[in-house]
Amino acid sequence: MDFEKAFAISASGMSVERTRVDVTAANIANAQSTRAVNGGVFRPMRVVSGEQRASFESFLSGGVRALPLNGAKVLQIANVDAAPRLVFDPGHPDANDKGYVSYPGVNQVNEMTNLVVALRAYEANVAAFNAAKVMALKALEIGGQ
Amino acid sequence: MEIMPIDGNFAPIAPIAEPKLSGMSGTSVFDTVMSEIGRVNDKLVQAGDELRMVATGDANNLHGAMIAMEEAKLEFQLLLQVRNRFMEAYQDLMRMQV
């Protein structure tokens, strides 16, 4: 059906926002981590999203009626170059020779803002999806009693 | 009034041409409906699979399952409307005076 396109676009937007929430959750969870998996200090991440390139197949199947509408997708999860937070704690096992412990440069305020923005963007995608669904259901009411 | 005998010089009666129904060649409407039923069934099965994946924790996203279910619901509603139109047409035919 022609409504599947709108559904797929909304679904791609929801996927991107879900990834944003996941990445933000990882940043918040690791805000107090002093060691990363590959050594050094954990580096905060951010999601870079972009327009999804429509497949050649979709152009073929859509024919001339196909609109150049693309969904969104996650292009990359980039590391943020934030300077580590140095805390003087000589007793800590990860303290350097001067007694300072490096904590990740996670900005809690930014992360909470990202969380709210991602949540609202997800809600907006759901609203767009529901609008398309209501439209489809209304179309099915044509001619009904 | 003079009655004429039948002398057998009748012109042969031309055979009545069968009326051709247009639009009956190729696939019939019922074939289309049957293939549509198959497609709706595929959608329902797909929605069921998504639901099972959510239940077993294999689903990578919840909205995918919900969207699959909504699509299946829409397709089924469409099929239902087509069926209603067919039943209406059938009942109209049945009520027709002969």
Image (cartoon, rainbow, N blue to C red):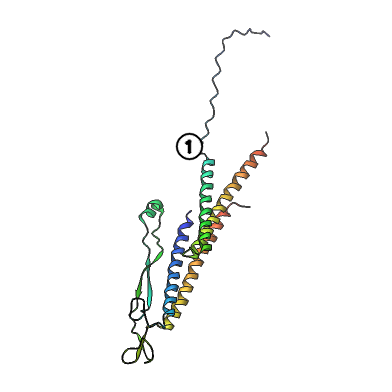
Residue A59 vs A96, above or below: the answer is above
Give the class, few, some or many, for how many residues have Cα within 10 Å of label 1's Cα (few <14, many ≥20): few
Amino acid type at mark 1: Gly
Identify the secondary structure beneath mark 1: loop
Q: Measuring 52% from the left and 41% from the top, which residue is drawn there?
A: B31
Location of residue B48 in the rendering, given as x and y in whole percent from the top left corner? 53, 56
Pick whichever, B34 or B85, lies toward us. Answer: B34
Pick whichever, A2 or B69, lies toward us. Answer: B69
Location of residue A31 in the rendering, given as x and y in whole percent from the top left corner? 41, 82
Q: Can the viewer see residue A65?
A: yes
Q: Measuring 56% from the left and 57% from the top, which residue is drawn there?
A: A137
Marker count (numbered) = 1
Location of residue A77 in the rendering, given as x and y in whole percent from the top left corner? 36, 72
Q: Residue furthest left?
A: A97
Look at mark 1 in the image and give the residue it sits on.
Answer: B26
Q: Chain of mark 1?
A: B
Please give left or right for residue B4 compared with residue A80 in the image.
right
Q: Measuring 66% from the left and 38% from the top, which residue is drawn there?
A: B94
